[in-house]
Image: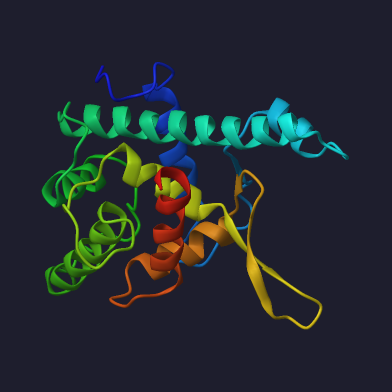
Amino acid sequence: MSENLSAYANYELGEAFFEIINKMVVRDGIPFSRIGDFEIVSPNWRKLADKKDKSPDEIKKIDDDYRMEIRDLADSCMVYMGAKTNNKTYKFTLDDYKNFLVSTNVDKFAIPNDKAEIENYNKKIEIQFKKIANHGEETGDNLIDNKDFAAFIYALDMKSERDENNNFKGFILNGKITPMDYAIAYRELKEDSDNMISFKLRQAYKNLFG
């Protein structure tokens, strides 16, 4: 395994992530509410996060452990993608990404059978790929690596927080990816515009890696 990946990265966790999020949406990106949330964090993390009157050390531990959980999950996704594409560099090109989608159940309901629709589908997949690979920036290396995917997972957990007047206050994290979170991101990732998922990806990468 690459020295750049977590020692806790494993194929099974990556497989579980992709299988669960794939079940969260129907073809048009509407959430499938009968699927439960995907828990990014461990029960111990949630127990400490829910504790009242946390000490500064406990607050730091919550942040450090969250980052570690994100890294382990993202790196596990890289291991799974690497196995499915036979790419052990863990840096994935657009062609790798397309091959991954075809060779797994990921996005299986969206892949068209009609040749006339394939061109449009491929354009949307390229938009999605670039948003993840360049973490929401307009340009980048056009390679998905473990940092890009960590930012993607982090962005999926970013929930908008509003005040009593419905004014946007910022984002909160609760360590869960809900079907609604993923369905919205699923749609926005394929939109050729600088939208909310683009903003979240930029913020996530900055928060994780400076």
- Location of residue 36 with respect to 125 vertically, above or below: above
Residue at figure coordinates x 31%, y 55% from the top left: 132
Q: Which residue: 88% across, 39% down?
A: 53
Locate residue 194, reporting x and y percent: 35, 75
Which residue: 62% across, 43% down?
175
**Residue 83 x, y percent position in the rendering:** 23, 27
Q: Residue furthest bottom?
A: 165
Residue 177: horizontal and vertical position, in percent?
A: 57, 49
- Residue 196's place in the image compared with 47, above or below, is below
- Picture quadrant where residue 146 is located: top left
Does the rendering let one see residue 114? yes
Horizontal side, residue 158 vs residue 162: left or right: left
Give the quarter of the image for residue 45. top right
Looking at the picture, how far across and down is residue 70, in whole percent?
49, 36
Q: Is residue 27 visible?
A: no
In the rendered view, tell whether residue 48 sits above or below residue 208: above
**In the image, is 13 to the left or to the right of 189?**
right
Name the residue furthest right: 52
